[in-house]
Amino acid sequence: MPRRGQVKEKPEDRLVDRVGLGVLAAQFPDALVDRVVTETGRREKRTRDLPAALMVRYVVALALFPSDGYDEVMRQVKVADDWLADSAGPVKVPATTAITKARDRLGVAPVKLLFERTAVPMALPRRTLGAFYRRWRVCAVDGTTLLVPDTDENAAAFGKPGNDSGEGALPQVRVLGLVECGSRALLGAGFGGTGGSKAASEQALFGDLLPALRPGLLVLADRNFLGFDLFEKAAATGADLLWRVKKDRRLPVDAELADGSYLSHLVEPGTRGKGRTIPVRVVEYTLDRDPGTGERLPASKKETYRLVTTVLDPDAAPAAELAALYSDRWEVETLLDEIKVHQQDGRLVLRSQSPDRVEQEVWGVLLLHRALRKLIHDTALVEGIDPDRLSFTHTVKVVRRQVVRRALFPPPPDGPDPGRGDR
């Protein structure tokens, strides 16, 4: 008999079908959920039908069933794990208004903290393909926007995109993520609006990722991020950086190196060259294939790239290898597609009608993606294959199908608490 949270093996099942959902469940054990609720001051003072710990799980369930109504998602949660149900009778599902009030009591902080506590490195050296380059764990930074319902509150908080033709129809939120290449697991995230009172650029949101940076990481980023202050702060974390440079950026040649790269420096802006400087190494190359498709580009579309890195020793990371490695940044695009298209079930607009609920929902979406990626990663390890060979879409369908029959987030029997230990 399979244990609670597991799937009985069948010869015809795909790989993900044959791995117990305990991997998903272990991401959010009861002890950790209770701790984040307590630490954020959301522990209820009296017994409620919808306690905070249940609502944390409910927010993640909303991300798993994006096309279902509030009451139906709550039914899935309660039936799956007998939450607050009378064992002798049918499950009573609270009214939608009661669920909404419970979400408001919960707030954003517990869900965000749960993400931060579980967003730990996932890939294993010599086992997770594409996750490491020499002595570094490879990560990439990129962002995206998500549409939210057009309420007055959302529009005021997050703003609407606009151009010369006028304002867009729906408000948008901006999400920036630090992604572990190979596993496609989120290690950090930042959240803001595209306008309105919570407007934040991708460069500003990068500050939210700094706590996730540490020695041993090699962080890839696009040309829009390179600024003196941001590069300096990111490098101060001990992580090594490999960032693209805009064409008009002046990078003086301080010393030419045998691998074709050269030493240079970034200069503090507004100091006429007399302020602080950051030593960097510059790698230049021409891209003759599309990074997304691998197809050869016509001569008119070939583009010259310039990268700056904090790895100054060419023997530690030769220029040709860094140029090839930079294409891993496109893994972030795949992750964004997984979230926006497959995990969201094609739903283009989030469901929440107020800013705090929107932010809460976004953190739930990110929590679910990490848990699904953990399931895929551990399945790949069992079979000794690349995680890319396992279908994210199929994984989502398997989890949705089985959650209804099993506990949504049961505590692992004697498993580790991902909220403890070093990040």
Image (spheres, rainbow, N blue to C red):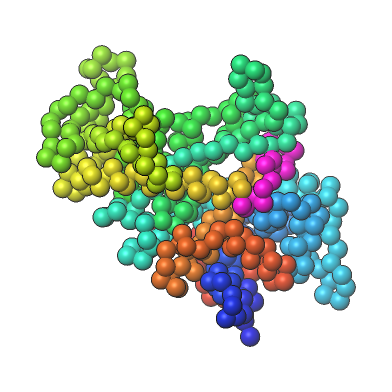
**Looking at the image, can residue 19 be seen?**
yes
Image quadrant in which you'd find residue 283: top left
Which residue does the image show at 59% across and 31% down from the upper left?
193
Q: Position of residue 263 (x, y in %)?
A: 18, 33
Magenta residues, as a range? 342-358
Q: Position of residue 175 (x, y in %)?
A: 55, 39
Kindly report the secondary structure that dominates the magenta region of the rendered protein: loop
Q: Position of residue 75 (x, y in %)?
A: 79, 61
- x 13%, y 33%: residue: 256
In magenta segment, residue 227:
no
Using the image as rendered, state which of residue 1 and residue 413 is in the foreground.
Answer: 1
User: Residue 233 at what x, y percent from top left?
Assistant: 35, 35
Q: Is residue 163 above or below residue 352?
A: above
The structure residue drawn at horizontal position 61% and vertical position 16%, both measured from the top left corner, is 164
Q: Quadrant of the C terminus?
A: bottom left
Describe residue 126's horizontal placement relative to residue 82 as left or right. left
Seen at 46% across and 67% down, the residue is 380
Whether residue 345 is situated above or below residue 88 in the rendered picture: above
The outermost residue toward the right is 89
Relative to 89, 386 lies left or right:
left
